[in-house]
Structure formats: C-alpha cells, structure tokens
Image: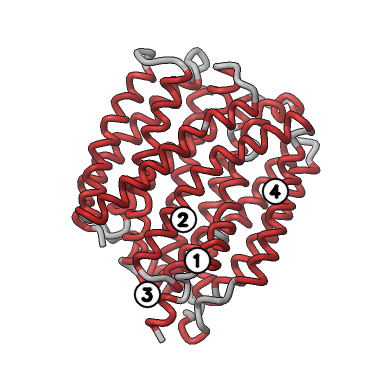
Amino acid sequence: MVESKAFAGDTFRFGAIVLLIGSIVRIGASIYLPAMPDIGRELQVSDALMSHTLTLYFVVFALFTLVAGVLSDAYGRKVILTAGMLFFIAGSTICALTQSFEMLLIGRGVQAFGASMIPGTLLAMIRDACSDARVVTLVGWLAVLSGLFLVAAPLIGGVLTYFLDWQSNFWFLVIFTLLVFFAAIACVEETLPKSDRIRLGGHRTLTVAYGILSSADFVLVLLPVILCFAIQGAFLAAAPYIIVHGYGLSPVEFGISNMVIVIGIFAGRAIGARLLKHCGPAEVYRTGGLSVLVVSILFGLLSVGMLNGLVMFLLLMSLFATVFGMISPIGMKSSLTAFRSTSGITASLQGASLLGASAIGSALVGLGAYLCPDHSIQSVFALVAALFCSGAAMASLASRHRLV
C-alpha cells in the first residue's frame, strides 16, 4: 500500500493540476505590482504604506499556513485546498470592489488566509503521492513556475491596468481561481487515506512542531531557502518603484523586464539538476553557497552606488534567481523528507517560514524607505539583499552535509 501511494502522483495529470494550484499564490502576490503606484494615487496613500499590502499578505499567509498543515493531516488534503481557493476568491472580490485603503487591506488579508491553505497542503500532497525523484521534479517546477509568474503576473497586471483599470487585476484572480477550483474538484484525488490521518490534538501538534523546529535537519537545511525568500519579498515590495518610478518603465515594460528572472531560475534549475546527477545534493548547496556569496558582494556595491543602472539591477536579480533556482528544490525536498511521517505539519512549518521571511523582506524595504527618505529604494533594497545573501551563503555551506 505504501509503495502504490508513493508513486500514485507520478502522472502528467497530477503534476499539471498541482502546478496550476500552486500558481494561484504567486499570481495573487504579484499581479497587482504594476498597479501599485496607481492604487496608491487613487486611494491617497504613500509608496511606503502601499508596501504594507504585501507585508500583510505575507504575515497572514505565514501565520495561517501553520493551521492549514495541521488540518490537512486531520481531514485530508483536498478539502483544505478547495476551501483555500474559495477564501482566495472571496478576498479577491473584496479587493476588486474596494474604495478605501482599509478595505483593500481587509481584502488582502482574506486573500492571504485562503492562499495560506495551499502551498503547505500542496507540498504534503506531493510528498504523499510521489516518489523522491518526482518530489524534487515537482518542487523544482513549482520554483520555476514561481519565477515565471513573477514575470507573467505583473505583465498580465500591467496590460489589464493599462487597458482597463487596477480593479481588473483582482477580477482576473477571481476568474482564474474559479477555473482552477473546478479543475481540482474534477481531477484531483485525495492523497491521504483516512487510516493515515492524525486526530487533532494541541499537545501532540505542539510537540511535533517543536521537534521539527529544533532540528538542524529542518532549520539549518531550509535556512538558505528562507533567506532567499526574504530577498524575494523585498524585491516584490521594491521593484515597482525601482523600475517604474526610478527608471521610467511602463507597467507593461515592468513585467517584460522581469523576464531575466525567469531565465535565471530556469538556468539555476538546470544547473542544480545536472549537479545533482553527477555530484549529489551537497555539491549543489556548496556551489550555491559560493555563488550567492558573490551575489552578496555585488548587491553591496549596488547599495553604495558603485554599480548602477537598470541593466545592472536586472543582471543582479538574474544572478540571484539562478542561485535561487539551484538550491530551493533541494532544500525544500530535504527538509520535508526528513520528517516524512508528519508531512502535513512539516510542510506547513516550511510554508510559514518561507512566507514569513518574505514578509520580513518586504517590511524591511518599507521601513527603510520610511526611515531613509534621502536614499533611493534601490539602495535600500540592495542593502537588504546583500545582508540576506551573506546569511544564505553561510547557511548553504554549513548545512550541505545534512541534506537527504
């Protein structure tokens, strides 16, 4: 029974639906980025305050991801996934109908609550149904898809904002999520049998969570990926103002300019896959650690003005994306596999850690822009990225021998 369950997800249909469901979170986080300056002007809020719409999304997301993992272990994966999509649709509708900044924040909070039920549950479903090789493949493709929608979502949002209005971004999310919802209902089978479910219990859950969080096999192995997600959160908060305000690109051009990030993630995934075949996961982390250290130095030079310009900014983001694409599938798979018997809780802790890091990154950019109004947002972002890259480099080198 275990063998058949482990390989039940090694099909094209399962992989395609998983990737579609996973794309909801990424699109929801970034589709409205090109419209942020327009939303701020219409609702009469500052750039720094608008960045809080991202921070709130990530904070709510991170907090409730923990609950979603426990519930998925108790009640199954599919019911939690579909409930999350319905809440996400409700939050997107509130955002589309908003006429005040406060209502926008409420809508983003409901969106994030729904989105929080998706990533950890999805990872647990992958772990339930797939072989180890398939887990790495799907997690890798989720990372690639994440980068793809980092470009595609703002590009879609830029086009919608240019030809319609900023509210159309959120109506697009309503329609897209509804389509994915019906596809999931029709095509996705439950991957956690009732016999394998864990009865809800606060003491047991806290004990398991403490054991996971106190283990270097989880924390240290995942730390490089966590720090990379912090940089990603900082980028999402800063990029609209760096590229649109700072360099004068249109919302559509903003989306196109991010293509270099997708190229970087694809390249990193290819490099990581090749190293994994010939050298193993430790070599992937070693190479990633040394590479991200170089990126850290370059970000430091950008923060003090020794490097400048749109081309240099995008080049550095492409280099960072390459490292991110290289190490993230390995770190996420290893930290999840180390606690296979409690994959729901483990996946929720993983998701909460990654999205919490994104919240910290976006919050630091907003705080830096507020405290240092004489410095450009690009300088603030580059400094934050340099610090997190340094930490990711050290963590990659320290944890590489713990990979499984």
Q: Where residue 2 sits in the image (x, y, percent)?
A: 39, 83
Q: Are marks 2 and 4 in contact (CB under 8 Å)?
A: no
- The tag on residue 351 is 2
Instruction: Quadrant for residue 335, please give it.
Output: bottom left
Residue, x 71% and y 55% (percent of image)?
Answer: 89
Residue, x 60% and y 55% (percent of image)?
Answer: 115
Query: The N terminus appears in which quarter of the rendering?
Result: bottom left
Q: Secondary structure at mark 1?
A: helix
Q: Is residue 35 visible?
A: yes
Query: The C terminus appears in which quarter of the rendering?
Result: bottom left
Point out the tag, 4 or 1, that comes first from the N-terminus. 1
Residue 266 vs residue 46: left or right? left
Determine which residue is flagged by label 4. 173
Q: Are marks 1 and 3 in contact (CB under 8 Å)?
A: no
Q: Secondary structure at mark 2?
A: helix
Point out the tag, 2 or 1, that comes first from the N-terminus. 1
Residue type, numbered disc 4: Leu
Determine which residue is flagged by label 3. 341
